[in-house]
Amino acid sequence: MTVPIQCRPDEVFVLNLGPQHPATHGVLRVKLTMDGEYIVKAEPVLGYIHRMHEKMAEAGSFAQFMPNTARMDYLHALAYNHGYVLAVERAAGIEVPERAEYIRVITVELNRLSSHLLWWAAFLLDLGGFTPLLYAFDDRERILDLLERITGSRLTYCYFRFGGVYNDIDDEFVAGTRDFIKRLRSRLPRMYHDLVTHNIILIKRLKDIGFITPEQCRKYGATGPVARGSGINYDVRKNEPYSVYPEFDFDVPVYTECDSMARYMVRMDEIEQSLRIIEQALDKLPDGPVRAKKVPKILKPAAGDYYAAVEAARGAFGCRLVCDGGKSAYRLKLRSPTFSNLSLFGEVAEGMLLADALAFMGSLDLVIPEIDR
Amino acid sequence: MDTSIWRPIIYLVCFMAFAGLNAAYLGWCERKGAGRIQRRTGPMEVGFHGLLQPLADGLKLMSKQLLVPEGVDHILFRIAPILAMIPALTSMVVIPFSGNIQGRAVELSVLMLFALASIGMIAILIGGWASANKYAVISAARSVSQNLAYEIPMLLTVITIVMITGSMNLQDIAMDQQGGFWHWNIFRFDKSVFMPVSFLIFFICSVAETNRAPFDMAEAESELIAGFMTEYGSMGFGLFMMGEYLNIVVGACLTTILFLGGWSCPFGLFPGVWWFLIKIYILIFTFIWVRWTYPRTQIYKLLNLSWKILIPFSMVNLLVTAAFIKVF
Amino acid sequence: MSAYWNDMFGGAKSLAIGLSITAREFFKPVITMQYPWEVPEIPERYRGHIELVKNEKTGKPKCICCGMCMRSCPSGCISLVGKKPEGEKKKVLTKYELDFTKCSLCGSCIESCNFGAIQFSRDYNLASTRKEDYVFDLLKRLEEQG
C-alpha cells in the first residue's frame, strides 16, 4: 500500500536500516527518511563487502579465478561457476563432452533448488514465521548432502573446470537425486503451499505490495524472477540458450500482477520446473568422459571480447571477458543481477510502510556479496 | 480460629511461587514446544532435557550489567520493566483457582483485571519512549494502537458474559458454569447462538493484548530488532519477558473462567483446581502453537481485523445475547 | 461484500489447515543431529585441507618438489622446500607447509600435481583459538599418520 507523501520537513527523521540488521540479507545499508512509519526516501548504500573480485581476475591465471566465482553468490555458486567457465570456453574454443554438460545442468538445477528453498525460508523469517525455515532446511540438507557426495563442498562449490567438471557422478547420486525429487514433490503441496502460500496472513502481507511496472524493470535492467513477476517473459535459458538446455522441456513461469505475491509464485513455480529439468536430465544422461581431452594447463586464449550469460537464481548473470593473449584476463566484468534488482528499491519504496518495504526487499531476493563483488 | 492473618500470607507466598515458576518455566515450555514443532529438540544440555535452562538464563540475566544508555529519561527507563510486571502479579490475587482458593473475593474483579491490563500497556509505551532509540519509539506507538484496538472487542465479549451471569465477580461467573461441559459458557446456546464465536474473538484478542505472534508488532524481531526492548539488557529485559509470560497466564486463566467453566470437570465428576490447571495449560499450549505457525500480520491489517471484523461481530453477539436473555 | 465473507471463511480455513500441519509435525521425530553426541559421516570426496600421500613401498612422501602446487594456488598458501642430498639424483622434501587461513579448498593444487602426491583429507573438526594452529606442517602430519 503506497500513499503519496507530502514531506513535512520538520516531522521527518532519518532511520538507518544499518549494515547490521536481521532483515537485510548481508551488509546492506539503507538510509531511510521516514515520516512516522512511512518511507519518504530510500537510498541503498553499498560497498561494505567489496572484495575486488574483478581485480583478482586480472592478477592470476584463468584457472586461479575459479574459487572466486563461488564466493560471489554463495547460494547459487554453481551457476556462477558455469557463467565464468562458459566465457573462458568460448574464448579458448574448448568443447565440452555431453556427459559433462548433463552433469552441469543437473548440479546447477539442484543448486537452484537449494537457493530458492533458502530464499523461501529467509523470506518467511523476515515476515515473522519461524517454523517454515526448519521445514525448508530439511529438504535443503538433503540437496547439500547429495552435492557433497560428488563435489566435496556444501556451499561454495569449485566443481566446474574448463572443458567439463572435476569428477564424475555415480549411481548412488542418481538414485539419491531421484529419491529426493519424489520426496520434495510430495512435500510441496502440504508443507509449502498449504502451510504458507495459501495462508491468509501471508496473502494479506504480500498482495499489492511493491508494484514494479514492466517499464521500471526495463529501465533498471531487472531480470530473473523480479522481471518475470512483472510480466516480462525473459529467461536466459530460453532466450539465449546455452549448454544442453534446448533439449529439455520446461516452462518459464511468468505472472503479470507485478506485486510481491507474483514474485513469490514465480519462484515457487521455478522450484517445480527445476525438478522437471533434473528428472529429464537424469533420464537422458549419456555415458562418456567428463572432461575435454586436450585442455592446456596454462590457458592463453586468443585476444578478443567474449561474453557469456547464464540464468542464476536471481537473474541473468553475465560474464564479459576481455583477453589480450596473455595467461590472465585483461578485464573481467561480472554483471550481477541483484545489483540491477536492488536499484529498483529506491524508487519503489517511496511511500511504503517500513514493514512493507522489508517484505518487498525480501521478495527481491538479495544477496549482498553478489552486489558488491 | 485466628487463621485470618495466615490465609493471606500463605496465599501470597503460593501465588508468588506460582507466578515465578510459570514465568520461568513457560519459557522452557515455549522453547521445547517450538523445537518439537520445528522437528528439533529444544534445550537439552542444562539438566535433564534442559529443565535447568531457565535457572541458567536467570543467572545469566542477573549477572549482566544493567546498561542505561545516555540520553534516556532516567526515572521512566527504570520504572518501565517494573510496571510491566506489576499488573500481571496483582491480577493473580482475584483469580479463583477453585471454589475456595482465591486471594481476595472482589465484587468487581472483572473490571479490576481490565484496568490492570491497561497499566501493562502504559509500561510498554513508557519503555519505548524512554529509550533514546527510534526503533523503540516506533514499536511503542504500534503497540499502543494495537492494544487499544483489541481491548474493545475483548470488553464487548466480556460484557456478554457478565450479562448472562449477572455479576462481575469471577467467583460467581465460574460457579454459574459448574456441572458438565454443556453448562460451560462456550456451549451455552440457550443464551446466545454465537457463544463459540465470542470465545474465538476473546481468544484472538488475548493473543493480541499480550503482544504474541501473529500480532507481535511491538517486538517484531526481524524488523525492529527487539522493538521497545532494544535498549534493555539484563534484568530489565528479563522483567519484560516475565511480564509477558505472566500476562499470558492471566489471559489463559481469564479465558478459562469466562468460557470454559473454571475448575469444573467436563463430565461433572470431580471439580477441583487440577481441572483449572489442565485447562489453562492447554490454552497456553495453543498460544505457543499459534505463535510458531503463522507469520506476522501487518500493522494496518491487524487494526483492520479488529475494527472491521472483530468489533462488528462482538457487537452483533452482544445484541443477540441481550435479545435471547430478554426473550427466553 | 462477498469478498469480505470469502476472505473471512477462506482465511479461517487456511489458518486451521496451517495449525493442523504444525500439529502433525509436532509428533514426528526430530531431524536434527545431536552433535557432538552424534557425529556425521564424512563422505569420501569431502574437501578437508590437503595432506601428503605416502609412497607405500618406500614410506616417504610421493612429492618430488616440483613446486607446481605452489604455483597453481590462487591464494599462495603452500610453501615447500626440497633439498637434493649428496649423491642422490632426486630432490627430497624437507618442508611442506600449508597456510590454511588462506586456503579456499579449490583443488587446483591437487589437479596440478602429476604425481598424485597430495589429496584432500577428511578433517573437519578444526576449532582453535590461535591463528598459528592453522599453519599445518604436512610432513609432520604424514609422519604421525604412518
Image (cartoon, coloured by chain):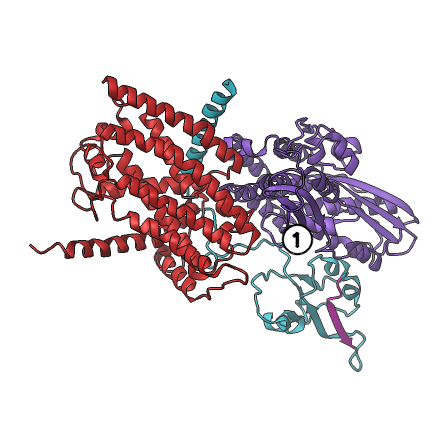
Q: State which chain is coloured red.
A: B
Q: How many marks?
A: 1
- In the image, what residue type sits under mark 1? Val
Residue A130 in view: no
Main SS of the magenta part reads strand
Q: Is A354 positioned to the left or the right of B42 in the image? A: right
Q: Depth check: B192 or C38 in front?
A: B192
**Mark 1: which secondary structure?**
loop
Q: Quadrant of the N terminus of chain B?
A: bottom left
Callout 1 crowding tier (Cα within 10 Å): few <14, some 14–19, many ≥20: many
Instruction: From this view, report whether residue B315 is shown above or below residue C28.
Output: above
> Where residue C136 sits: x, y (%)?
65, 70
Instruction: From this view, report whether residue A206 is shown above or below residue A18.
Output: above
Instruction: From this view, report whether residue A96 is shown above or below residue C125.
Output: above
Q: Quadrant of the C terminus of chain B?
A: top left
> Where residue A234 sits: x, y (%)?
75, 31
Q: Depth check: B286 or A333 in front?
A: B286
> Where residue B176 sits: x, y (%)?
19, 32
Q: Chain A is which colour? A: purple
Q: State which chain is coloured cyan.
A: C
Q: Depth check: B135 or A101 in front?
A: B135
C132 in magenta: no
Q: Which residues are magenta?
A: C75-83
Kindly identify which chain the residue marked by label 1 belongs to. Answer: A
Q: Residue furthest left?
A: B1
Residue B49 in view: yes
Q: Quadrant of residue B81?
A: bottom left
Name the residue that disc number 1 marks.
A27
